[in-house]
Image (tube, rainbow, N blue to C red):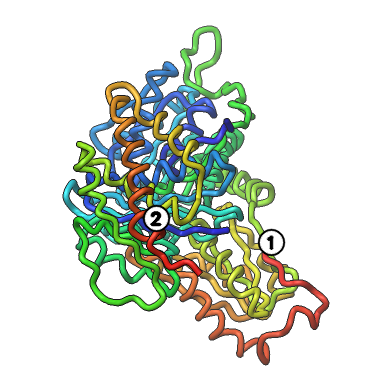
Amino acid sequence: MTEKVILVGYGGQGMMLFGRLLAQAAMLDGKQVTFFPSYGTEVRGGTACYHLIVSTEEIYSPVVEEADTLIAMNQPAYLKSRDYLRPNSLLLLNSSMVRREDNYNGIEVYEIPATEIANELGNVVASNMVMMGAYNYIKKLISIPLFLNCLKQTLRGKKAALYEINKLALERGEEYLKNAYLLKAPTI
Amino acid sequence: MSNKHLMTGNEAAAEAAIQAGCRYYYGYPITPQNELMNHMAMRMPQVGGTFIQAESEIAAIYMAYGSAAAGARVMTSSSSPGISLKQEGISYLAGSELPCVIVNVQRGGPGLGDISPSQADYFQAVKGGGHGDYHTLVLAPSSVQELADLVYDAFDLADRYRNPVMVLGDAQLGQMVEPVEFSRPPRTYFPKKKWAITGAEGRPRNIIKSFYPVKGELEEFNLYLQRKYQKIEEKEVRYEEINTYYSEIALVAYGTCARICKEVIRKASPLGYRIGLLRPISLWPFPKEALRNLSERVKAFLVIEMSAGQMVEDVRLSVLGRCPVHFYGRTGGGVPSSKAVLEKVLEIIPTVSAGPLEMAEMGLPPKVD
């Protein structure tokens, strides 16, 4: 099993934390991980891009050339990283801020209004966890308790109070996906 | 819970240095190696060491010179433009036979270049860089774990040979986050440094210098250095060979490029192509002998670098025309894609064989490792 994920968004939308927590949890799960954050000229408000590879085998190239999953939090970042998609890729869009551009053949697309959901919960910054909830529900990459444990380790001190809202955001993301897509799917 | 830590290559290099007994670090900030300095700034006070953000790269390398002369384990780091500034000091370290570890997290050049991954400092690192007949040992890791491991070894080698050792990474390795384990003993080889300047009370004074003005003295010293370098070339060559035994084409690459080449082998294997990889781990001393031996088995070499072609010259010198040596490189911060390398391989294959041979014909299963 190898999963190559690209996470893109504005600097400040929490894609770094999202990727890092995923990597941490996958590592603790005994998987190989390589996480490559963009660096240098990125600033808050600019686009930020993170490459994550999780595998049960040794990871050779640390460079993601074709993504199994693209998670896009805003329009410019989404347009910039569309080229990573190949047929059968999974595309998760934060529909609060991204308008789907064209019809993708063979690409599985899910639109989740992550910013709105996080806003309803009272913290717009938790939109990354909404996406995580939806993403992991589809891919089942790691166990949620393990992920939450990593989240708890990260949110310490002053940030400890943010744990509950992040946990809630994660659950809401999963719930939204189930309600909007999976429950409506025709049963054969 | 395991002992694995999720760290950037830069942080892992710094932590490995601390665990190898390095207590003095001097540096000057430059992307993409800042996490290394950052980690040192945090950790040095915790372990009673010294961290100084110097006023320049040149100041930092001479501070390292001072600590090395006093017998301490010391490290400095920078990225390409900063390493250029350090070259004078590195030549002085080699001329004064001082052990010191220098980490170069390469970025695109020439000049100020950019901050993307590059391997264009190969010549500078292995051919001297500064003035005079000298060599630094050069180690080239290809993962965060190996970066940490080689930093340990770099300190041992520096002390063993009283010589500066360079760990040559690139922006990809420095910025990449991977699990790393620090399970090796903190000190593997930490000799008594009788030559160090520690105060001469009760013993004859020690002199650390690289200046030999008397006619003949310097040549004698140079001949001694060459004997030392020869010993290093005999003893310290490191490389990894993958899948080379049955291969017609051998890729040669180090660092990040070597990992991309492994991906190429993985992709080519189901197509029935027999491709191997020789990955130099020590760039100086260079695995000449291994390449020479390999040149008798394979039909062609393909060297992959993030440069316009630097290591390829050493490969050609090792192979000495026994078989063709092809090259594919990206420059200025470009990273070769496995797709592009595979295309290059497919271009070369008709020149060495009629077409893909079924591994089954040889009675061998396709194999990557």
Question: Dividing the picture into quarters, in which one does residue B2 lie?
Answer: top right
The residue located at (65%, 86%) in the rendering is B352
Q: Nearer the viewer, mark 1 or mark 2?
A: 2
One can see residue A71 in this view: yes
Residue B279: horizontal and vertical position, in percent? 60, 60
Chain designation of label 2: A
Chain designation of label 1: B
One can see residue B94 in this view: no
Q: Which residue is mark 1?
A: B369
- Position of B25 compared to B145: left or right? left
Q: Tag 1: residue type? A: Asp
Q: Nearer the viewer, residue B225 or B149?
A: B149
Residue B5: horizontal and vertical position, in percent? 50, 35
For label 2, count other residues whose C-alpha is less than 10 Å away and answer few (under 14), some (14-19) or many (20+). Answer: many
Residue A46: horizontal and vertical position, in percent? 18, 53
For label 1, count other residues whose C-alpha is less than 10 Å away and answer few (under 14), some (14-19) or many (20+). Answer: few
- Where is the N terminus of chain B found, in terms of image quarters? top right
The residue located at (64%, 62%) in the rendering is B288
Of the numbered discs in the image, which one, if any, rests on residue B130? Answer: none
Q: Which residue is mark 2?
A: A51
- Position of B140 compared to B131: left or right? right
Question: Dividing the picture into quarters, in which one does residue A124 lie?
Answer: top left
- Where is the C terminus of chain B found, in terms of image quarters? bottom right
The residue located at (45%, 44%) in the rendering is B9
Query: Is B269 located above or below residue A94 in the figure?
Result: below
Query: Is A108 located above or below residue B358 in the figure?
Result: above
The kind of secondary structure element at disc 2 is strand
Q: Nearer the viewer, residue B61 or A101?
A: A101
Q: Tag 2: residue type? A: His
